[in-house]
Image (cartoon, rainbow, N blue to C red):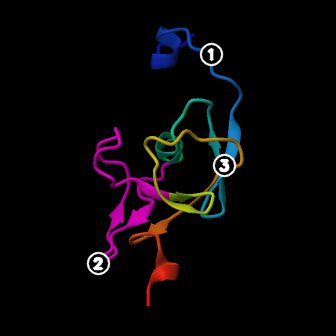
Amino acid sequence: MARTPAGLVRAEPGPPFEITFDGRTLTALPGQSIAAALWGAGILAWRTTREGGRPRGAFCGIGQCYDCLATVNGEPNRRACLVPARPGDAITTQEGHGHAELSV
């Protein structure tokens, strides 16, 4: 195997599968978090802030900061760094607090 982290530990991940981000088809690997799959596809931001609409993505990578919130399969406020990617997952950019339907 190549001299990569997976190669060094002789990891043999299962076959890749498809997820979508804002309608765009991406490839993920078994065991990857949603954040890792998005990063692997070159996507660095998948949320905007409530104030100012500034882009956010993964920051701490361990579920402490909440910068990586995403809407996963219609459920807002999921921490993408902690949620494992599953075949067929539909991830969408989360705008603000993720509950636009509650705004008046």
| Quadrant in the picture for residue 22 | bottom right
**Residue drawn at (52%, 44%) of the image:** 34
The range drawn in magenta is 42-70
Q: Are marks 1 and 3 in contact (CB under 8 Å)?
A: no
Quadrant location of the N terminus? top right
Q: Amino acid at mark 2?
A: Gly
**Alpha carbon separation for disc pair 1 and 3:** 20 Å
Q: Tell me the residue that label 3 is attached to.
A: 19
Which residue position holds label 1? 12
Res 12 → quadrant: top right
Count of numbered marks: 3
SS for dot 3:
strand
Residue 23 on the magenta segment = no
Q: Amino acid at mark 3?
A: Ile
Badge 3 or badge 2: first in the primary sequence? 3
- Give the amino acid type for the residue marked by disc 1 in the picture: Glu
Mark 1 or mark 2, earlier in chain: 1
Q: Residue at the spot x=35%, y=65% of the render?
A: 55
Residue 52 is tagged as 2
Chain-order first, disc 1 or disc 3: 1
Residues under labels 3 and 2: Cα distance?
29 Å
Element on which disc 1 rests: loop
> What predominant SS class does the magenta segment belong to?
loop
Query: Which residue corresponds to the image point at 48% horizontal and 49% vertical from the top-left?
Result: 42
Marks 1 and 2, how far apart at CA:
43 Å
Which of the image's four quarters has the C terminus?
A: bottom left
